[in-house]
Image (cartoon, helix red, strand yellow):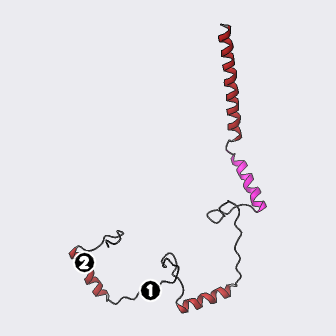
Amino acid sequence: MIMKTALTALAAAVASLVTQAAIAQDAASAPKTRAQVKAETQAARKAGTLAPAGEAGDAAGGSAKPMSSTKTRAERKAETQAARKEGALAPAGEAGDAAGGSAKPMNSTKTRAARKAETAEARKKGELQPAGEGSNK
């Protein structure tokens, strides 16, 4: 009976030590409070190490340095005007070709009435491709 009591006491002691270690570990890795996060943010802002919101920061999470241009605004505007006159400007957005060159608008050789008649004929024959389905070729 003494042996059983001793083993029970030993098991209880081991269980309490394991529990204390687990609680201590949880306390060390506990999430920060709102006040702690705000204080860290203010400190980073004052130190100038606060990373900008969005995708502007670098991959390591550091602050991104603003880019500075070597040209004046007037020089950039003049270059843009010259490129516009030459037709070398790429269209805005993702409409340009994959190589990044300028995409010149295609001029149609058919009239609006001819295109409408062609579309109506294709509809009658069931040759129209549903929107967003790509080509069957």
**Residue 105 shows which numbered tag?**
1
Count of numbered marks: 2
- When the figure is inspected, residue 32 is found, relative to residue 62, above or below; the finding is above
Residues in magenta, as a range: 31-48
Task: Classify the position of the C terminus by image quarter.
Answer: bottom left
* Residue at x-position 69% and y-position 37%: 25
Q: Mark 2 belongs to which amino acid?
A: Ala
**Quarter of the N terminus within the rendering:** top right
Percent x, y of residue 7: 66, 15
Q: Residue at x 71, y 63 (%)?
A: 63
Assign the magenta stretch its main secondary structure. helix
Query: Residue 22: x, y in percent?
Result: 67, 33
User: Magenta span has 73?
Assistant: no
Residue 118 coordinates in the image, percent (x, y): 26, 82
Q: Looking at the image, which is closer to me, 72 or 16?
A: 16
Please give left or right for residue 85 compared with residue 57 in the image: left
Q: Is residue 58 left or right of residue 108?
A: right
The residue that appears at 70% across and 71% down in the rendered structure is 66
Q: Residues within 10 Å of mark 2 (few under 14, many from 20)?
A: few
- Give coordinates of residue 13: x percent, y percent: 70, 21
Q: Is residue 18 left or right of residue 131?
A: right
Going by the picture, which residue comes out furthest to the top?
Answer: 1
Taking the spot 75% from the left edge, 52% from the top edge, the residue there is 39
Question: In the depicted view, which residue is nearer to us: 39 or 76?
Answer: 76
Marks 1/2: CA distance?
25 Å
Residue identified by numbered label 2 = 122
